[in-house]
Amino acid sequence: MQTLLTTKTISMTELREPAKVFSQAGDTPIAILNRNQVVGYFVPISAVETVQTRPASLDAVKQAFSSQKHRLAPALHYLRDK
């Protein structure tokens, strides 16, 4: 069972009419479903304009990588030879 990150959904077929999708979205994200499986999200600019971002410090990045190192190990091993 997939977890939806929004309460609004549309089907792939409804993407044929993008103006309708834009009007339905308003200021909230919409999950795009294909055969009842989430394949993506449509996130209008108005939904993310108010999100405040700030750069992470080098220490914060190092801490995040060290806490996720076990999960990232396969990717890091793959990238070592590239």
Image (cartoon, rainbow, N blue to C red):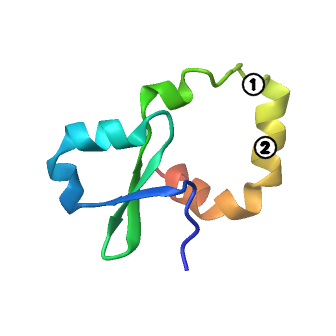
Residue shown at the point (79%, 43%) measured from the top left: 64
Foreground residue among 62 and 42: 42
Query: Where does residue 74 sit, x and y in percent of width and height?
Result: 59, 64
Side (left or right) of 71 relative to 24: right
**Is disc 2 in contact with disc 1, using a CB cutoff of under 8 Å?**
yes
Nearer to the camera, 39 or 32: 32
Could you say which disc has been placed on residue 23 in the image? none
| Mark 2: few/some/many CA within 10 Å (<14, 14-19, 20+) | few
**The residue under label 2 is which amino acid type?**
Ala
Q: Which mark is residue 64?
A: 2
Q: What is the secondary structure assignment of the residue under circle 1?
A: loop
Split into 4 quadrants, where in the image is the N terminus?
Answer: bottom right
Say few, some or many: other residues with alpha carbon within 10 Å of mark 1 (under 14 / 14 to 19 / 20 or more). few
Q: Nearer the viewer, residue 54 or 16?
A: 16
Q: CA distance from mark 2 to mark 1?
A: 10 Å
Q: Is residue 53 left or right of residue 59?
A: left
Residue, disc 1 = 56
**Residue 66 on image: x %, y %:** 81, 48
| Quadrant hosting residue 13 | bottom left
Residue lying furthest bottom in this view?
1
- Residue at (22% x, 51% y) in the render: 15
- 62 sits to left or right of 27: right
Image: 66 above or below 32: above
Say whether residue 1 is left or right of residue 42.
Answer: right
Q: Is residue 15 above or below residue 26?
A: below
Tally the marks: 2
Place of residue 80 in the rendered image (x, y in percent of width and height, measured from the top left): 55, 51
Q: Secondary structure at mark 2?
A: helix
Q: Amino acid at mark 1?
A: Ala
Give the mark, 2 or 1, whose residue is nearer the N terminus.
Answer: 1
